[in-house]
Image: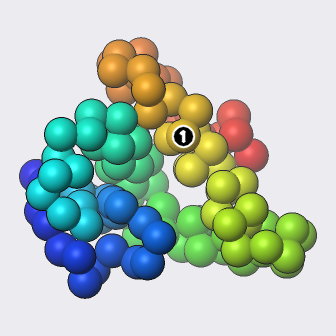
């Protein structure tokens, strides 16, 4: 289910996935299938890790990357969940082809 909230989405971001919802900054973004696919990949990741473990892993990996790289954007882009989503967001068949726990390949 896609919802819209310009207040929930952090600055400089356009979408956010919190199972079972995809939040977009504005309604016009709902036509962006690449963005929707990116967020749908995150929904699948969240299901695999029972939601709470996804966010725990996400935060811990971000902190590790931030200490390692000393740059907020670089840390974000190097989180395994984000790497998988960005690399495959343009493939409309990715979720059908994706193997369970595929984000591990991006560590």
Residue at image position (56%, 50%) is: 81
Instruction: Reply above or below: 57 against 97.
Output: below
Query: Along the line of sight, which residue is nearer the eye, 15 or 43?
Result: 15
Residue 7, image x, y percentages:
25, 83
Residue 36, image x, y percentages:
28, 42
In the image, farthest residue toward the right:
68
Q: Quadrant of residue 97?
A: top left
Residue 84, image x, y percentages:
57, 39
Instruction: Reply above or below: 59 against 57.
Output: below
Instruction: Reply above or below: 7 against 106.
Output: below
Q: Can residue 44 be seen in this view?
A: no
In the image, farthest residue toward the bottom:
7
Q: How many numbered circles are shown?
A: 1
Residue at image position (89%, 70%) is: 68
Residue at image position (70%, 74%) is: 72
Residue at image position (45%, 54%) is: 49
Q: Mark 1 points at which residue?
A: 86
Question: In the rendered view, does 101 fall on the left or right side of 51?
Answer: right
Query: Along the line of sight, which residue is nearer the eye, 61 or 15?
Result: 15
Local SS, label 1: helix
Question: In the rendered view, does 63 fall on the left or right side of 88?
Answer: right
Q: Quadrant of residue 27?
A: bottom left
Q: Quadrant of residue 96?
A: top left
Question: In the rendered view, does 67 fall on the left or right side of 28?
Answer: right
Query: Along the line of sight, which residue is nearer the eye, 7 or 49?
Result: 7
Q: Is residue 58 visible?
A: yes
Residue 23, image x, y percentages:
23, 63
């Amino acid at each position: 289910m896609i919802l819209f909230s310009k207040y929930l989405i952090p600055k400089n971001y356009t979408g956010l996935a919190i199972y079972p919802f995809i939040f977009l900054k504005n309604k016009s973004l709902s036509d962006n299938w690449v963005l929707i696919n990116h967020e749908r990949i995150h929904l699948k990741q969240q299901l695999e890790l029972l939601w709470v473990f996804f966010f725990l892993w996400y935060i811990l990996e971000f902190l590790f990357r931030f200490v390692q790289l000393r740059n907020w954007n670089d840390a974000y882009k190097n989180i395994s969940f984000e790497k998988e989503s960005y690399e495959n967001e343009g493939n409309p068949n990715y979720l059908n082809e994706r193997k369970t726990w595929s984000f591990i390949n991006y560590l």
